[in-house]
């Protein structure tokens, strides 16, 4: 009996970022994904008291962004609880205060990067440990190559960021890259979707953990420059990040 014929490729399901029919529809989508990313970060233990934030630019009012409300646990995040904040840090919609540090850093990154939809920053354990060393991610694994020559170090620490000028300096250090390591502070990632920014944060945190573990075990062998660049070109786009994030979204979406 002959084996079954291959199915036409066009009949196989492959998820791609949705195309929205209106700003209202896109707003609902971004808020759902933002709440889901917060819950996912909570499940990974990235929450540290009231520190840590993910923001998403509003699709219609592009100088405003949605952010997790001050004092609400990550794993309780719901789209209806998110607050909308303008560029001056004033709450436009919602029932909670905004964390001023969230506004200061995230607002400046959003302002400097019109291409960025979402910004993620928390004090995750391994990211904070590598940040304390004031080092960048080395090209040690396929995943870490996504950040090769596409992340930066903000080589300063001046306390809790409540100063717009400090926020601008952090945005300047980030430049056009996907991530910045804030010395003695933690990690910050960006993306053209909530899914991409969240994936880059998860992947960067894991890269920090692997780098610290490899160094503790011996002398790590770096991937050569040409191969690291080629791998980044294959895996370093926001579309690839979005695709990688979808299994995690499906898992966390069941908690709503």
Image (tube, grey):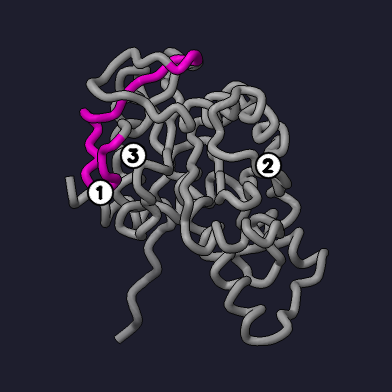
In this rendering, is residue 189 above or below 163? below
**What's the CA distance linking mark 3 and mark 2?**
22 Å
N-terminal of the two: label 1 or label 2? 1
CA gap between label 1 and label 2 equals: 29 Å
Q: Quadrant of residue 188?
A: top right
For the residue carrying disc 2, how many other residues have a C-alpha within 10 Å: few (<14), some (14-19), or many (20+)?
some
State the mark number for residue 33. 3
In percent of the image, x 68 and y 39: which residue is there?
Answer: 174
CA neighbours of label 3 inside 10 A, class few (<14), some (14 to 19), many (20+): many
Secondary structure of residue under mark 2 = loop
The dot on residue 75 is 1
| Camera-side residue of 25 and 217 | 217
Instruction: Identify the residue under disc 2.
Output: 177
Q: Quadrant of the N terminus?
A: bottom left
Residue 79 located within the stretch drawn in magenta = yes
Count of numbered circles in the view = 3
Picture coordinates of residue 75, whole percent (x, y): 25, 48
């Amino acid at each position: 009996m002959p084996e079954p014929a291959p199915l036409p490729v066009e009949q196989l399901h492959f998820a791609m970022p949705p195309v929205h029919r209106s700003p209202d529809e896109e707003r609902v989508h971004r808020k759902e994904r933002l709440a889901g990313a917060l819950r996912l970060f909570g499940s990974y233990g990235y929450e540290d008291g009231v520190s840590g934030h993910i923001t998403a630019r509003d699709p219609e009012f592009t100088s405003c962004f949605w952010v997790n409300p001050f004092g609400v646990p990550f794993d309780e995040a719901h789209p209806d609880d998110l607050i909308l904040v303008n560029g001056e840090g004033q709450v436009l919609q919602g029932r909670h205060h905004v964390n001023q540090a969230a506004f200061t850093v995230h607002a400046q990154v959003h302002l400097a990067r019109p291409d960025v939809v979402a910004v993620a920053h928390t004090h995750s354990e391994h990211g904070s440990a590598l940040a304390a060393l004031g080092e960048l991610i080395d090209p040690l694994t396929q995943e870490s190559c996504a950040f090769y020559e596409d992340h930066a170090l903000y080589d300063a620490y001046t306390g809790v960021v409540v100063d717009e000028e400090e926020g601008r300096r952090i945005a300047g250090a980030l430049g056009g890259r996907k991530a910045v390591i804030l010395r003695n502070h933690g990690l910050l990632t960006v993306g053209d979707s909530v899914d991409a920014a969240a994936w880059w944060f998860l992947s960067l945190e894991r890269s920090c953990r692997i780098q610290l573990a490899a160094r503790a075990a011996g002398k790590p062998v770096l991937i050569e420059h040409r191969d690291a660049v080629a791998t980044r070109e294959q895996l370093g786009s926001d579309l690839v990040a979005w695709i990688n994030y979808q299994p995690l979204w499906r898992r966390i979406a069941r908690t709503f």
